[in-house]
Image (cartoon, helix red, strand yellow):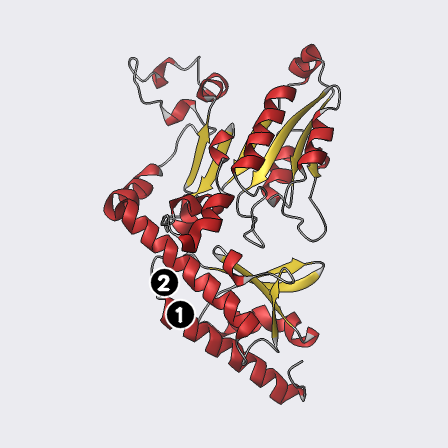
Amino acid sequence: MLGACAAAGVREVQVLTSMGHSSLSKAASVVGLGRRAVREVPLSEAEPWRLDLDAVERELRREGVASIVAVSAGEVNTGRFATTGAEDMRRLRELADKYKAWIHVDGAFGIFARALPATDEFAGLRESTAGLELADSITIDGHKLLNVPYDTGIFFTRQSATLEAVFQNPNAAYLSAGGPSSIPSPLNIGLENSRRFRALPVYAVLVSEGRSGVADMLARMVRLARGVAAALVEDQSLKDDFELLPEGSAPEVTHVVVLFRARDDGLNEVLVKQIQDSREWYVSGTKWKGKPACRIAVSSWRVKVEEDLAFIKKKLAEIAREWRRHNGTSGV
């Protein structure tokens, strides 16, 4: 890689992103770029998940620097999108073509918004994913919203020939596929020489559910997440004890991730543990602006919107009530 960069006059490789997934830094470290190669270019403090396209353009102009722009389509903490729609992606594509940059979309779960029913209810989410097909590569996690086994990743690229050039085993005659084929061998397009049939569960889900079945499953996930978000903002039994994040968020922009915190700092420190210790439901702990936060990621095909929403509201209200009873505090 060093030789190729030197021959091309490239002295640095950078990855530009906004609230990029931690795997970006890990990947940069693995391939030898170093974690410092990943640079955050957020639009603002209020919307750190959005890409600042003007800042991206300034970075792309740097002489002797090759750039990858990593677009978060469903940032892991907030579920928000780095681009707002087709216009943003068209501009990004024009910049990438002009400055010879590569656009990668981390579509782990956010890209599934494209498969939601084409109704007014989901119009905003569908627009947030518009234009993502202009990217050079896209990664998707099947194990999230498709409910298939863990590590079932999906990778799309416009440059499949590059994969074959990098990953093929040219000196292993015994691994020959035995002749030309229209289907590329996984052996020659990825790191693993030996791998299980990861595509089968994904294929089975798509065939068994069909377009409408997948759309219905995803719609129920979104409705439950939005119901939880709305309850945190509007429900009298919750809004004084909990706060929807990011601050000032509207429930209707929620996809499948609900980020929130307890208003009482003491309860906020132990909220995730209290939920986990119940062994009735599961959330993940994270941080927002340096403070603990709680993250609900709705991703089960078994979602029953009204029943599950009532359960979550009841359990959160119980947790807040018990905390006040034991600590002598009242709702804020």
Q: Is residue 241 left or right of residue 85?
A: right
What's the residue type where badge 2 is placed? Val
Residue located beneath label 2 in the image: 303
Q: Secondary structure at mark 1?
A: helix
Q: Position of residue 245 (x, y in %)?
A: 61, 62
Quadrant, the C terminus: bottom right
Q: Is residue 16 left or right of residue 115?
A: right
- Where residue 308 is drawn, which disc sits there? 1
Identify which residue, 91 or 321, lies in the foreground: 91
Q: Secondary structure at mark 2?
A: loop
Identify which residue, 173 or 36, lies in the foreground: 36
Q: Earlier in the sequence, mark 1 or mark 2?
A: 2
Alpha carbon separation for disc pair 1 and 2:
7 Å
Q: How many callouts does the rendering have?
A: 2
How packed is label 2: few (under 14 Cα within 10 Å), some, or many (20 or more)?
some
In this rendering, the answer to whether 29 lies above or below 121 is: above
